[in-house]
């Protein structure tokens, strides 16, 4: 059996713990094995022990073109040779990027830039409350919209806490928890009943068009359009959180694919191929409430908003999407991966469903396609994580954590995909055998 070399990573991780609580700077990064990464290029990442992986984690999705993409990096370097951050006025890069987003994203009549998806959703929710004069928000069980009190509840809930009052953190305001209502994804009746019960108090519905925080659960026919109709009927705003789906699934976001235009949209991740930038966009009549326009009464600020690094990277990323077959390529590879893994599962007689869209996929080890978070309790989490850890031993990196998605980038080659599929079959054979042996040993 191949064992990963992790000695250098472990030593560095122990040092990291001396200076940083838990040794990592985002909680979800603290998984075993604790790796320290030192280099990335194209479809590959490398750790401190010299292990090379084909990367499908993609830092949770930003790398749609691949790591250290030369065109994007070149445009960032070019921008920094003449500009950076001024703290006053507007830059030409901000104007150019705003024009591109307003051109491509159906809901984007105007746009403002910030630095993270959590910031973007915070601004969108505050704006919705200002527009409607209402306090409450509907989000869906299992969806993730950032770390702030408005939305940090009922994310990866324990199964006995699904739909119940499940704060994601200590220190949250009780009022914030009570003003965020939880509904079941793909269940319009549940949403309608909630709106009727809370008539006149719901400012907005916020939703991941595809809940990628829990892998990939696709919206049922009419669900997203139904949310828009319900918002219109009850005077609430519809917010699409496209921090993950935006630009990865289409240059116009998943809203363009679905043909449903929300009132407000948040974006990030794939828009700048790994460089830090995010955005909130929407209808002009709403966006002009922000106090970036004189007379606006909704506060919007941030020292690093519109920094040259993020704006230059986003322009370059979108330019490549405009000029090259980025989505065509990654969608073709994604379709191939999903089809082939289904074939592998069938050949090996392993219970599983392959869910995904475009360049994203995950394999749930259960016997039906899940429609919402609660149904994911039927996924074999132990097998799911063991599968991912064994793939790491073969040089395939998928985050070794339950219910996480995988991403294909424009840098992945057919050879990368072919090797990945070969290793997937090898690993599943090994796991099926070891799990069978374990079961028989238990019976003995």
Image (cartoon, rainbow, N blue to C red):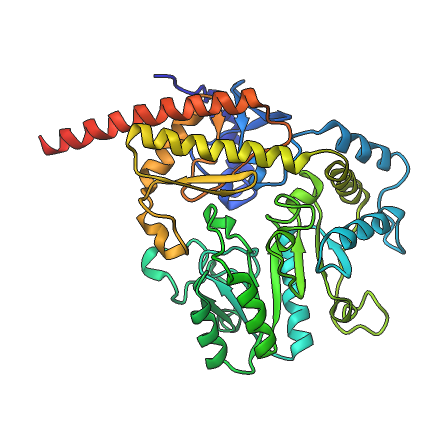
Work out whether 190 lies above or below 53. below
Give the total of numbered labels: 0
Which residue appears at 42% of the width and 32% of the height? 341
Which residue is most to the left?
444
Which residue appears at 43% of the width and 70% of the height? 190
| Nearer the observer, 196 or 222 | 222
- Left or right of 365 on screen, residue 56: right
Work out whether 82 lies above or below 168. above
Q: Position of residue 137 (x, y in %)?
A: 55, 70
| Nearer the observer, 49 or 261 | 261
| Nearer the observer, 87 or 192 | 192
Work out whether 260 lies above or below 312. below
Quadrant of image for the N terminus: top left
- Left or right of 169 on screen, residue 350: left
Which residue appears at 56% of the width and 83% of the height? 200
- Left or right of 267 on screen, residue 300: right
Q: Position of residue 351 (x, y in %)?
A: 30, 38
Residue 122 figure quarter: bottom right
Q: Position of residue 3 (x, y in %)?
A: 39, 19
Which residue appears at 48% of the width and 80% of the height? 196
Which residue is most to the bottom?
200
Work out whether 212 lies above or below 223. above
Q: Position of residue 241 (x, y in %)?
A: 60, 57
Q: Is residue 305 visible?
A: no
Q: Is residue 279 visible?
A: yes
Quadrant of image for the C terminus: top left
């Amino acid at each position: 059996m191949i064992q990963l070399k992790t000695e250098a990573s472990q030593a560095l991780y122990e040092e990291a713990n001396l200076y940083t609580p838990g040794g990592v700077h985002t909680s979800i990064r603290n998984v075993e094995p604790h790796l320290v990464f030192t280099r990335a290029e194209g479809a590959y990442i490398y750790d401190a022990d010299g292990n090379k992986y084909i990367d499908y984690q993609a830092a949770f999705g930003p790398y749609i073109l691949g790591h250290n993409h030369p065109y994007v990096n070149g445009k960032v370097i070019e921008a920094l040779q003449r500009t950076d951050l001024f703290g006053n006025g507007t830059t030409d890069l901000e104007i150019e990027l705003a024009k591109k987003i307003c051109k491509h994203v159906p809901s984007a009549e105007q746009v403002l830039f910030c630095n993270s998806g959590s910031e973007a959703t915070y601004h969108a929710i505050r704006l919705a409350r200002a527009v409607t004069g209402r306090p409450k928000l509907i989000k869906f069980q299992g969806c993730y919209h950032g770390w702030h009190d408005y939305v940090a509840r009922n994310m990866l809930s324990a199964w006995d806490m699904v739909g119940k009052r499940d704060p994601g953190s200590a220190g949250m305001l009780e009022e914030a928890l009570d003003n965020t209502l939880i509904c079941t994804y793909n269940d319009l009746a549940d949403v309608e009943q909630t709106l009727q019960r809370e008539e006149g108090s719901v400012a907005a519905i916020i939703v991941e068009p595809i809940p990628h925080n829990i892998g990939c659960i696709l919206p049922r026919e009419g669900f997203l359009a139904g949310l828009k109709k319900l918002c219109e009927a009850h005077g609430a705003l519809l917010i699409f959180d496209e921090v993950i789906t935006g630009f990865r699934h289409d240059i116009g976001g998943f809203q363009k694919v679905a043909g449903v235009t929300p009132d407000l949209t948040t974006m990030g991740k794939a828009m700048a191929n790994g460089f830090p930038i995010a955005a909130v966009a929407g209808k002009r009549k709403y966006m002009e409430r922000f106090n970036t326009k004189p007379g606006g009464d909704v506060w919007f600020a941030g020292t690093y908003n519109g920094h040259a690094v993020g704006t230059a990277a986003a322009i370059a990323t979108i330019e490549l999407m405009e000029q090259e077959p980025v989505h065509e390529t990654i969608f073709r590879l994604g379709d191939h991966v999903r089809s082939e893994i289904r074939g592998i599962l069938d050949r090996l007689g392993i219970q599983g469903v392959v869910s995904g869209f475009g360049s994203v996929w995950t394999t749930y080890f259960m016997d039906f396609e899940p429609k919402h978070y609660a149904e994911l309790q039927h996924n074999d989490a132990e097998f799911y994580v063991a599968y991912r850890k064994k793939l790491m031993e073969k040089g395939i990196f998928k985050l070794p954590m339950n219910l996480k998605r995988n991403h294909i980038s424009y840098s992945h080659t057919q050879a990368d995909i072919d090797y990945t599929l070969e290793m997937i079959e090898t690993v599943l054979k090994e796991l099926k055998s070891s799990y069978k042996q374990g079961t028989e040993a238990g019976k003995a």
